[in-house]
Amino acid sequence: MLPLAVLLVSTISFLLTPVDNTITRTMEYEADLYGINASQQPDGEAEVDLMLGEYRKLDPGPIEEFLFFDHPSGRTRITSGGGAAGA
């Protein structure tokens, strides 16, 4: 019975991963906007996002972002921040 329960929970968790990622991505997006508004330095956010792009894909496809990304892509963060680097 326990192996069946573990299999069921694992399968449900796997299937809900994109939903969980979307929720987390939305919260991170809102946190980025809050940080930009608090610091009044959108260029700083853009610079950090470009640095993160050295080890993280800046512009994933929409399906890739939906399935695998739990944070906004670098391109989304740069353009939504309105920094000079995104303009």
Image (cartoon, helix red, strand yellow):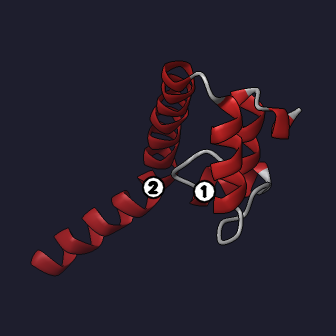
Q: Which mark is residue 85?
A: none
Q: Quadrant of residue 56?
A: bottom right
* Dot 2 amino acid type: Thr
In this rendering, would 79 be left or right of 20?
right
Label 2 residue SS: helix
* Dot 1 amino acid type: Leu
Q: Quadrant of residue 87?
A: top right
Q: Could you tell me residue 64's position as x and y percent?
A: 70, 58
Q: Please tell me how crowded label 2 is: few (under 14), some (14-19), or many (20+) other residues with Cα within 10 Å.
A: some
Q: How many marks?
A: 2
Of 8 and 26, which appears nearest the observer?
26
Against 4, residue 53 (above or below) is above
Q: Residue at x 49, y 48 (%)?
A: 21
Q: Residue at x 83, y 33 (%)?
A: 84
Q: CA distance from mark 2 to mark 1?
A: 7 Å
Q: Residue at x 10, y 76 (%)?
A: 2
Q: Could you tell me residue 37's position as x and y percent?
A: 55, 19
In this rendering, would 34 be left or right of 41?
left
Q: Could you tell me residue 32's position as x and y percent?
A: 53, 33
Q: Which residue is mark 1?
A: 67
Q: Could you tell me residue 9's position as x and y percent?
A: 26, 63
**The N terminus lies in quadrant:** bottom left
Against 7, residue 79 (above or below) is above
Q: Residue at x 70, y 48 (%)?
A: 47
Q: Which residue is mark 2?
A: 17
Q: Can residue 18 be seen in the rendering of this structure? A: yes
> In the rendered structure, are the residues bearing label 2 and label 1 in contact, judged by CB atoms less than 8 Å apart?
yes
